[in-house]
Image (cartoon, helix red, strand yellow):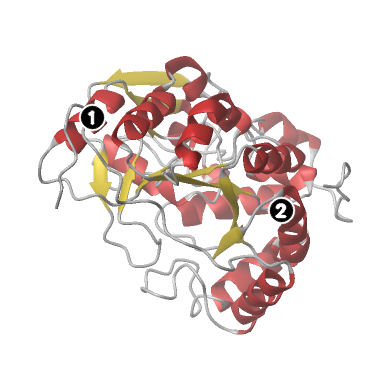
Amino acid sequence: MDKKLKQDHFKVAISSKKEEQQYLQGRGAQINTRNRFLKDERVKEHIEAIDDWDEPNLATQYIEQEAKTIVNKVESPDVGMAYSMNAYAGCEHGCIYCYARNVHEYWGYSAGLDFERKIIVKKNAPQLLRKQLMHPKWEVMPIMLSGNTDCYQPAEKKYRLTRGLLEVCNDFNQPVGILTKNSGILNDKDVLQEMAQKNLVRAMVSITSFNEDLRRVMEPRTTTAMQRLKVIEELSKAGVTMGIMMGPMIPGLNEHEMQRIMKAASEAGATFTAYTFIRLNGAIKLLFHDWLYKNFPDRADKIWHLIEQSHNGKANDSRWGLRMRGEGGIAEIVAQQYAKYGKLYNMNEGRTGLNLSSFKRPGQQYTLF
């Protein structure tokens, strides 16, 4: 694995000193958009019409709760998972493009800054999972950690709920998948290695760019691309099957990096890949538009129109089969790159499923038939 990653030719910079003073460093979203479920609220969507609006950069708030369920059935045919579980709602990573932002509105918060600053912590998540797996009607299928928000976001340092979920899965021989962009996953290398020996776990690291200027504003509280490659390298050496998620690919920003991301990940030990194409549903459309024009005023129009061209003239696309891949010339080029370089770097060859046959409830004897 290369020790140095070459930077792209462009730099990311706030367009003016006045705007810089208003820009909330360390946050992806810069505003709170309207919650479509609330009748009365105070939001900032059109800054040109508001005088003396001060948006303080508040500290992250952890809101602890006792959840009722933890395992969710996934109905979408586009995401490649049957079940997911999320110990945290909201995500301090602050990725501006994150589709999970819209879900935060169901909790009564904004998909904007609230999503990054008000993190709901399901303190009883491991206990709920154990109860779910003990239920006699549970039919073993892989469960995806981080099906919505990152299970290794900063809150995990304090609460260790992901660790608890993995320990329950290990006790039951319950297969799991993991998707993260945080090096905190290395804290659980011991249990992951034990599960990997039983073919019970696969992990994916999300890598969207090797441009650190871009990463700092697009994914402000995540670890660097170099550190993510080190995560792949260390866990693959420990026997964990590792992959990468290149998502989302954004035309004019990072879609040209697909080859070098796949090459570097392959050299680090990744053996499988996935990608998504940018889509901007719900409040994410407003948030991304605001972010784009603040950080890339010189190319914002071009990028925005390329996104629209890839989704039948709209930035928001909900069509099954197309919403995660896009359509048209740009999306097709991305798809061709993905297929070409996946083959070139021997990715996605000979993949086998996780072990579903060794599931066993603690205290339960195996049956003969």
Q: Position of residue 70 (x, y in %)?
A: 25, 36
The reply to whether discs 1 and 2 touch (Cβ–Cβ < 8 Å) is: no
Residue flagged by tag 1: what amino acid is it? Arg
Instruction: Looking at this view, name the residue that lies furthest to the front.
Output: 368
Q: Nearer the viewer, residue 141 or 365?
A: 365
> Could you tell me which residue is drawn at 77 percent across and 50 percent down?
210
Distance of label 1 from label 2 (alpha carbons): 34 Å
Instruction: Looking at this view, name the residue that lies furthest to the left.
Output: 136
Q: Nearer the viewer, residue 147 or 2?
A: 2
- Count residues near mark 2 (Cα–Cα under 10 Å), then give few for <14, some for 14-19, many for 20+: many
Q: Position of residue 103 (x, y in %)?
A: 34, 45
Query: Above or below — where is 127 with respect to 288?
Result: above
> Could you tell me which residue is drawn at 59 percent across and 60 percent down?
272
Look at mark 2 in the image and give the residue it sits on.
265
* Mark before the other along the chain sequence, 1 or 2: 1
Residue 330 - label: none
Q: Position of residue 348 (x, y in %)?
A: 58, 66
Q: In terms of secondary structure, where does tag 2 sit? A: helix
Instruction: Looking at this view, name the residue that lies furthest to the bottom.
Output: 329
- Count residues near mark 1 (Cα–Cα under 10 Å), then give few for <14, some for 14-19, many for 20+: some
Q: Position of residue 98 (x, y in %)?
A: 50, 49
Query: Above or below — where is 267 with respect to 344?
Result: above
Instruction: Looking at this view, name the residue that lies furthest to the top.
Output: 158
Q: Would residue 68 be visible to someone looking at this image?
A: no
Q: Would residue 274 be visible to someone looking at this image?
A: yes
Q: In terms of secondary structure, where does tag 1 sit? A: helix
Q: Decide if residue 50 is on the left or right side of residue 41.
A: right
Residue flagged by tag 2: what amino acid is it? Ala
Look at mark 1 in the image and give the residue it sits on.
130
> Could you tell me which residue is drawn at 65 percent across and 74 percent down?
334
> Could you tell me which residue is drawn at 49 percent across and 57 percent down?
285
